[in-house]
Amino acid sequence: MPNLSFGFPLIKAIRKLSSLPLDVHLMVTNPAFHVNQLIDMGVQWISFHQETEYHCHRLITLIKQHGIKAGIALNPATPLSSLSAILPELDYVLVMSVNPGYSAQAFIPSALDKIEALSKIRAERQLSFCIEVDGGVTADNASSLRKAGADMLVSASYIFSSTSYTEAIKSLRG
């Protein structure tokens, strides 16, 4: 399936049609460049990949100063240890269970171990960040993801390829 990106015009159009929270995952090499525009658009959640930002703490602080939830997205090969210093500052961690960039990829099972370990760290350090999971999320793995500690599930191709969006979403909620 081809690479698909939802740019600023689509975000603006969605914001005009809905007051529901908008969660933006910046899969770009320069996330700080885009944050002010997203703030102006009224998004409520912004995550980015720490590998793309020299000053993660500064960017997280900027995002949070505007009342927006700030998160870090972790690629499948990015270790949890890379979050150690910044974890207390985060509102959420987005665990990628596929390599980002393409829709309809197969779920990478090792993401479950990462979610469980992150959930354990959250409990041990008495932190309150949410765990979000994106990539290959379906009714077949949603229960396991929630049991591992996931708070939010992101699913696109599973929902949009179903005959009933409502039923697909219900099946993810369990």
Image (tube, rainbow, N blue to C red):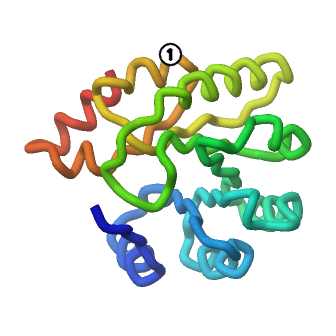
Q: Residue at x 64, y 42 (%)?
A: 77
Residue hosting label 1: 147
Query: Residue 168: percent from the left, percent from the top?
Result: 21, 36
Query: Residue 23: percent from the left, percent from the top?
Result: 52, 57
- Nearer-the-camera pick, 154 or 12: 154
| Residue 127: quarter of image | top right
Q: Is residue 146 above or below residue 6?
A: above
Q: Residue at x 17, y 34 (%)?
A: 167
Q: Residue at x 37, y 25 (%)?
A: 141
Question: What count of labels does the image hold?
Answer: 1
- Nearer-the-camera pick, 16 or 158: 158
Residue furthest to the left in view is 163
Structural crowding at the residue carrying mark 1, measured as other residues with C-alpha within 10 Å and reported as few (<14), some (14–19) or many (≥20): few
Q: Is residue 3 above or below residue 171?
A: below
Looking at the figure, which quarter contains the N terminus?
A: bottom left
Please state if 132 lies on the left or on the right of 90 as rendered: left
Looking at the figure, which quarter contains the C terminus?
A: top left
Q: SS class of the residue under badge 1?
A: helix
Query: Residue 140: percent from the left, percent from the top?
Result: 29, 24
Query: Residue 66: percent from the left, percent from the top?
Result: 74, 66
